[in-house]
Amino acid sequence: MAEMKYTKDHECIYVDGDVAWVGITDYAREALGDLVYVELPEVGKSVSKGDDFAVVESVKTAAEVYSPVDGKVVEANDNMPDDLELITKALNEGGWIAKIKMSDASQLDGLMNEAAYKDYLSELD
Amino acid sequence: MKETALHNAHIRAGAKMGEFAGYDMPLYYPPGVIKEHEWVRSNAGIFDVSHMGQITLKGEGVVQFLETLTPSAFEPKAHGRAQYTVLLNEEGGIIDDLIITRVSDNEFYAVINAGCKDKDIAWIKSKMPDDVRIITHTDRALIAIQGAWSERVLHEVLGVEAHDLPYMHMMKTEAPDGSEMLVSRVGYTGEDGFEISVYNELAEEVWDKLADHNVVKPVGLAARDSLRLEMGYALYGHEIDATTSPVEAGSSWIISKKTSGYFGYDRIQKELSEGTRRKLVAIKLIDKGIAREGAEIHNENDQAVGVLTSGGHSPILKASIGMGYVPPELSAPGSKVFVNVRGRNIAAEVASLPFVPSKVKSIKKNAA
């Protein structure tokens, strides 16, 4: 059973072997409000940990999605821009924004698990 | 932060609150911005606009004073007639936009922007002649109801008969407790609707009564913004500010041909005869994306020629729309431009206003 990982910027990651499926957490989704647009990364693009590689746009604002790992974008969710409701689904049920093939899977060790992320949220405003 | 008389009502309704012009205001309620916006265009929404300033100017010299402060004519205005206009500074730039209503020969009521009200009042007081006085109605709240059902709701809930009240007119009537209630057929959404002024201690009761009607939902400031954007209405601080003239901003229709000697007169006359260096236009994105205020507008040679003053998503058109300043040669509807978002040029074109049809009950059909 793949484990979910979380970042301080509210990305969530579903780990599938050496591919990280990246999306945003419920917290980020609620903060954004009604979504109106998603800018997907180009397939084949190399990313470094911390690079902004996608944008999620709501009526209020645009939010960058940051890559949690170094790697290469192997798939982008082309269904999402026309069906923004997908963002409400779990990552492995269509809510993923892009899939990144990791060049160094050990980078995941530095990310939060679900319990740690919940603690992190309770410390935020 | 300041609070309006309706603050408690918004908390009870579960509004997401946020700061605007120093007030803690409802940005949206649980349905969310898009649903609220759609509801106003198909039913009726109520907005707390009590943060805006309500003032009265009265006295022997008030008509002449208003014709100095604004480029509009007030002498011929009938009692009850509301006029959209601007306060101009000495350079012909806009201090604020506002609606001024003639109450009687020498009494006028005005609603001014929340973020400008202190500045406006200070300016008015500094220029006021001895035969004019100002009253600031800080004891009054203002509720807007907008949407096709507005007239019916006003009748059913408040017993107000507004059937014969034309657009851009005000009537005085009685609030539920018998105190004076002002009802103006004006709005900021392009729908038929009214702005209702009642004393603060009555505001929550009136709001709750309206909200209880099954075709009414409370609507926050976020949807208020997306609604006015679909109409192409200016928002102070965005489309208009102290550097913009009403000519540049496409509001020449408010400039009287009969009056003169108002602040900024020289610049206005020059622009009317010689043209302006920039014009406010409506912009619609053709390619996918969303453009927001501050985004650069590029011409077909990728030169930056202007800037977006407002931008966002239109729930009715399901497209990205905005407004911005461009050179006159690019201002005709259909002109091809690009809007630069995060380094990428998104294809766009100049559109006609309003983006969405206006449903206000224009007085043209009532004019003799």
Image: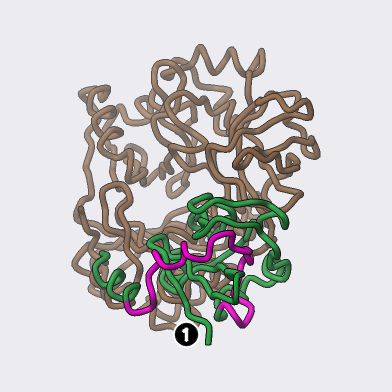
Chain colours: A green, B brown
Disc 1 is placed on an element classified as loop
The answer to whether residue B113 is magenta is no
Left or right: A105 in relation to B122: right
- Which portion, as a residue range, is magenta? A91-115
Q: Nearer the viewer, residue B181 or B248?
A: B248
Classify B193 as above or below B300: below
Image coords of residue B172 (percent x, y): 36, 59
Residue at left offset 24%, top offset 30%: B122
Classify A102 as above or below B138: below
How dense is the environment of label 1, judged by Cα within 10 Å: few (below 14), some, or many (20 and up)?
few
Residue at left offset 59%, top offset 42%: B342
The residue under label 1 is which amino acid type? Asn
Q: In the rendered image, which residue does mark 1 sit on?
A: B214
Image coords of residue B127 (percent x, y): 27, 22
Q: Tag 1, which chain?
A: B
The answer to whether residue A107 is magenta is yes
Left or right: B52 in relation to A11: left
Residue at left offset 62%, top offset 60%: A37
Classify B283 as above or below B124: below
Q: Residue furthest bottom?
A: A1
Residue B262 at least partly seen: yes
Choose top left, top right, bottom left or bottom right for residue A20: bottom right
Q: Nearer the viewer, residue B2 or A64?
A: A64
Residue B162 at least partly seen: no
Choose top left, top right, bottom left or bottom right for residue B66: top left
